[in-house]
Structures are given as structure tokens and as C-alpha cells.
Image (tube, helix red, strand yellow):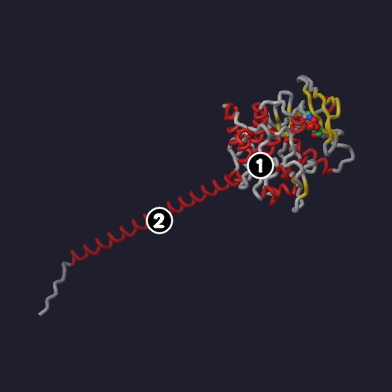
């Protein structure tokens, strides 16, 4: 015989309700926890991705020489203005031509004569200035290219960058007025004073150029034509970076040669990646800085002497580098070699170059070992 014992209906109902309630509360809680978890991890991933993207962008900009450090003004390319006249108005002061007193011609530029004279602004002290003029009969494009330099220079304010006083655009001749540098271009200055400076004086000049270049690279400006001929020297041997107009065009530079891609490049001063595929950056400016170091330590010797441009390109590709000039400290030649690393990311930044030079200046005994002594 089989007996089946039915549970007490009340107790059974209560048990079922309890199971249903527990299951629903548990399920709901699980759902809430799951939703929260998905939300948080999703957000985190989004946040992490966003951080990574912005960091990548920052790095990419830094390596390509754009918008590097916050708090430092960024260079604005005048070519991004629809109307380049607007860029000139924004970055350069218009000077009343009656304030300019031209004294004599000191040279010739691509666009016209370079003169020296005085700027006599009422209520201000007279200052010596160099005046670049645009010769008559110019085309509109030439006027724009000429004034492009002023729109670039007018954005800089650094003791080792040539200072723009202003422009004359509302009357003829069109002029760019900059501070006067008594000793002219660094290359010719050194050639006429062969062996006349101490190593410490030469390193002081190099330090000035490094200060100017650090400033430019911080602003995201790539020079592209850094060479001793484009550095000006004042009466106290302060060196200042100049020649900004040619950073894109390079028509004015007699050293610039046409490449296979049609661009004009000063081969001996230019990094291999910039020659090969136009990759100009602050790192390629560092390569050029190494060449300027060599020019300074050799008192204006021509880099790679009489080698042809093609031979220079091939030799560099094969690993050849300029040897230390006579009387050059080992430490300085090592810095040059560091600037000439094939891999651009392996080169020092201008900040590194500057702090290295500062250490040498603070501890001049580090300049006593010359390459010739080591070789001997
Ligand atoms: O080597 P230099 O005497 O220095 O000859 C060239 C010439 O003009 C043609 O560019 C000189 N030069 C250019 N800018 C200035 C300046 N701001 N102060 C003094 N000389 C300058 C340059």
C-alpha cells in the first residue's frame, strides 16, 4: 500500500513564495551588479582609450615638432591663413617709413638689397637695424613670400632668435626691419677669425644657438635650413638664429640643391630621412645642429669639403661621419656624432643638447681632452 503525505497547504505556499521572492531579488541584484560592472568597465575602457589616444597624439605632435609643451606659445604657420596679409598684420608691427634712416647696403638677398641703418621711433631710443627690401617690379606671390619671413619671425621672442622690429607694407619699397647684428653671418665671421677664440668661447656660441633652437622646437617650429650661414653674430658674440622665410621655399639658399622629389634641400646640413622622404622635424634640425657644431669648431670649414652632394648622401648612408675638427674636445665630437644618429628617435632633443653644453661650461676641464690627443 502506498501513502502519499501532502504537505500542509499553508506551509507549501509560504515556501513557494519565499523561493520566488528570493529568486527575483537575487536575479534583480545580479542584473544590477552586471549592469554596473559593464558600465564601469566600459567607461574605464573608454577613458583608457581616450587617454591613450591623447597621449599618442601628444607624442606624435611632439615628434613631428608640433604643440609640444603646454604653457608655451605655439607657432602658427602663415600658410594656414587664407589671406597671408592678415598673418603679417597679426604678427608684425607696421613702421612709419619716416622713422627709418637707411645708411648703407650690406648685402643682397633673393628679394632685394639688405641695408643697415637706424630706427628712430619718437619717444624711444634710436636702435641700429638691418633693413631687407623688396625690389620693385615684384609679383604678388613674391611680395607674399618676402613678407612670410616677417609673419614667422614676429611670433618669436627669444634672446637667441633674431628680433623683428616691424615691416613697411603700406608704402614702397616694402621692407622688413630687424635688429642689427654687428658681426654678420657666423660662417664668414669665423672664417675671418680662424683660431682666434678659446674653446669655451666657441662653446658659448654653440650654447646660444642651442637656446634659440630649443625655443623654436618648443614652439613647434621646424627650421629646415639651420646652418652657420643662417646664424647672425652681434658685437658681444651672441649668436642668433635667423632666415625663417626660406624654411619652406629654400630658394634663397645657394647651398640648397634640387632632390629627386623636386624639393630644394641643403644636402650637407640635412638629415638622411629629410633628404630621402622629406621627413623634416625637430630631430632633423638636431642633425643640422650637429653640422653647425662642426662648422663652428672648424672655424667655418665647408662640411664634407669638396665632396659632391651625391657622394655625401652615399657616404652618410654607408655610416661615414665627419671627423673631429683640429683641436676639438672629444666630448663635443661625441655630441656631434650623437646628433648624427641615423635613427632620428636616437638623437638628443635640443633640451638635452643644451643641458649637455651647460654641464661642459660649468666644468671646463671636460673640454681639455682633445680628439687629436686621444688619436696620438
Ligand atoms: O655675412 P653678412 O655680413 O651678414 O652678409 C649677409 C648679408 O646681410 C646678406 O644677407 C647680412 N645681414 C643679414 N641680416 C643682418 C642683420 N640683421 N644684421 C647684420 N647683418 C645682416 C648678412
Q: Please count the marks in the image.
A: 2
Which residue is the extreme one toward the left?
A: 1
Nearest to N terminus: mark 1 or mark 2: 2
Where's residue 149, x and y in %? 76, 37
Label placed on residue 287: 1
SS under mark 1: helix
Between 84 and 59, the one nearer to me in the picture = 59
Badge 1 crowding class, 10 Å Cα cut-off, few under 14, some 14 to 19, many 20 or more, is: many
Between 172 and 34, the one nearer to me in the picture = 172
Residue hosting label 2: 35
SS under mark 2: helix
Which residue is the extreme one toward the bottom?
A: 1
What residue is drawn where x is 63% and y is 45%? 64
Badge 2 crowding class, 10 Å Cα cut-off, few under 14, some 14 to 19, many 20 or more, is: few
Residue 167 in sight from this viewpoint: no
Q: Is residue 99 left or right of residue 227?
A: right
What residue is drawn where x is 60% and y is 42%? 347
Where's residue 268, x and y in %? 72, 43
Ligand 1 is found in which quarter of the picture?
top right
Between 287 and 324, the one nearer to me in the picture = 324
Between 89 and 285, the one nearer to me in the picture = 285
Q: Is residue 273 left or right of residue 181?
A: left
Question: Which mark is in front, 1 or 2?
Answer: 1
Amino acid at each position: 500500500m502506498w501513502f502519499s503525505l501532502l504537505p500542509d497547504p499553508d506551509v507549501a505556499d509560504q515556501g513557494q513564495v519565499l523561493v520566488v521572492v528570493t529568486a527575483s531579488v537575487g536575479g534583480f541584484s545580479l542584473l544590477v551588479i552586471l549592469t554596473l560592472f559593464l558600465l564601469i568597465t566600459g567607461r574605464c575602457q573608454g577613458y583608457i582609450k581616450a587617454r591613450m589616444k591623447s597621449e599618442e597624439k601628444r607624442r606624435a605632435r611632439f615628434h613631428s615638432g608640433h604643440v609640444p609643451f603646454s604653457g608655451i606659445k605655439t607657432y602658427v604657420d602663415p600658410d594656414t591663413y587664407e589671406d597671408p596679409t592678415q598673418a603679417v598684420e597679426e604678427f608684425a608691427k607696421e613702421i612709419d617709413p619716416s622713422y627709418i634712416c637707411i645708411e648703407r647696403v650690406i648685402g643682397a638677398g633673393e628679394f632685394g638689397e639688405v641695408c643697415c641703418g637706424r630706427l628712430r621711433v619718437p619717444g624711444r631710443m634710436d636702435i641700429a637695424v638691418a633693413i631687407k627690401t623688396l625690389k620693385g617690379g615684384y609679383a604678388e606671390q613674391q611680395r607674399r613670400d618676402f613678407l612670410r619671413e616677417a609673419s614667422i619671425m614676429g611670433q618669436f621672442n627669444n634672446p637667441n632668435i633674431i628680433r623683428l622690429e616691424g615691416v613697411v607694407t603700406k608704402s614702397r619699397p616694402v621692407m622688413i626691419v630687424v635688429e642689427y647684428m654687428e658681426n654678420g653671418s657666423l660662417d664668414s665671421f669665423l672664417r675671418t677669425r680662424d683660431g682666434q677664440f678659446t674653446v669655451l668661447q666657441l662653446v658659448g656660441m654653440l650654447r646660444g644657438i642651442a637656446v634659440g633652437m630649443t625655443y623654436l622646437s618648443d614652439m613647434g617650429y621646424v627650421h629646415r635650413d639651420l646652418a652657420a650661414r643662417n646664424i647672425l653674430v652681434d658685437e658681444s658674440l651672441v649668436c642668433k638664429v635667423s632666415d625663417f622665410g626660406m624654411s619652406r621655399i629654400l630658394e634663397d639658399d645657394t647651398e640648397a640643391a634640387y632632390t629627386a622629389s623636386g624639393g630644394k634641400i641643403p644636402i650637407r646640413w640635412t638629415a638622411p630621412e629629410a633628404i630621402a622622404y622629406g621627413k623634416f622635424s625637430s630631430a632633423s634640425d638636431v642633425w643640422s645642429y650637429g653640422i653647425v657644431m662642426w662648422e663652428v669648431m672648424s672655424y667655418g670649414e665647408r662640411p664634407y669639403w669638396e665632396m659632391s652632394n651625391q657622394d655625401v648622401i652615399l657616404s652618410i648612408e654607408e655610416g661615414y661621419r665627419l671627423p673631429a675638427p683640429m683641436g676639438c674636445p672629444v666630448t663635443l665630437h661625441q655630441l656631434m656624432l650623437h646628433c648624427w644618429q641615423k635613427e632620428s628617435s636616437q638623437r638628443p632633443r635640443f633640451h638635452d643638447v643644451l643641458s649637455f653644453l651647460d654641464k661642459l661650461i660649468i666644468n671646463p676641464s671636460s673640454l681639455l681632452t682633445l680628439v687629436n690627443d686621444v688619436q696620438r
